[in-house]
């Protein structure tokens, strides 16, 4: 059993399987931290500052909604905390896992898909490659 588990989410719809795994692995007095990472865009010659601010606000709201939605899936008897950060998802997940000294990261092996995933790469793969923490990849069907 694990005392502190980090559960990153991108709101992609695989939450039920991740919640089930975490519920099975958490110690009775353990802590679950649900994390969503909102990207942060910067202004450029192609995007005005106003448009970029609106996009950043929307990404942050989506991240907040993702953690709230996942939090509702856990039994009230569990110690569940939520966190929203801004940054690059894989890097931020690894940084938070180190800052909070978690015992385990439970992450979906597939999340966002299509062209976005092809260009960006797999967040789960990057976390697995760059983290010193134990990582459980949840295969989604």
Image (cartoon, rainbow, N blue to C red):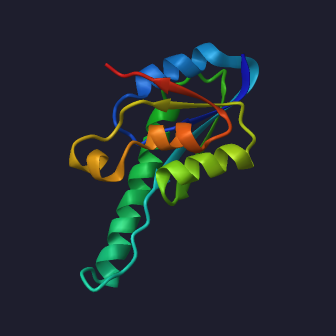
Q: Which residue: 73% across, 49% down? A: 99
Q: Which residue is drawn at the image coordinates 54% and 24% (left, top)?
A: 74
What quarter of the picture does the C terminus occupy? top left
Is residue 25 shown left or right of residue 121? right
Q: Quick check: 1 above or below 88?
A: above
Task: Pick the quarter of the image with the N terminus.
Answer: top right
Q: As drawn, is 38 to the left or to the right of 94? A: left
Outermost bottom residue:
45
Picture residue at 39% right of the left edge, 66% below the top: 56
Please determine whether, in this image, residue 65 is positioned above or below residue 134.
Answer: below
Q: Position of residue 62 (x, y in %)?
A: 38, 51
Q: How many marks?
A: 0
Q: Quadrant of residue 27?
A: top right
When asked about the image quadrant of residue 30, the answer is: top right
How far across and down, in percent of the image, does residue 135 sit? 59, 30
Spot the residue most to the front: 129
On the image, the x and y values in percent for residue 129 come to 55, 40
- Residue shown at the point (27%, 46%) measured from the top left: 118
Residue 82 horizontal side relative to residue 70, left or right: right
Nearer the observer, 5 or 78: 5
Image location (x, y in percent) of residue 15: 42, 28
Question: Relative to residue 2, is residue 9 depicted above or below?
Answer: below
* 46 relative to 101, above or below: below
Lateral position of residue 31 relative to residue 7, left or right: right
Depth order, front residue of 76/51 = 51
């Amino acid at each position: 059993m694990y005392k502190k588990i980090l559960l990153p989410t991108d709101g992609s719809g695989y939450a039920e399987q991740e919640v089930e795994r975490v519920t099975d692995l958490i110690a009775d007095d353990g802590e679950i931290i649900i994390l969503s990472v909102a990207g942060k865009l910067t202004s450029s010659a192609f995007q005005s500052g106003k448009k970029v601010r609106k996009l950043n606000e929307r990404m942050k709201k989506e991240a907040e909604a993702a953690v709230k939605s996942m939090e509702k899936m856990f039994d009230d008897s569990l110690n569940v905390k939520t966190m929203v950060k801004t940054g690059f998802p894989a890097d931020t997940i690894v940084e938070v896992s180190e800052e909070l000294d978690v015992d385990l990261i439970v992450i979906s092996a597939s999340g966002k898909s299509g062209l976005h995933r092809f260009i960006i790469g797999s967040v789960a793969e990057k976390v697995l490659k760059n983290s010193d923490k134990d990582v459980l990849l949840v295969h989604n069907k």
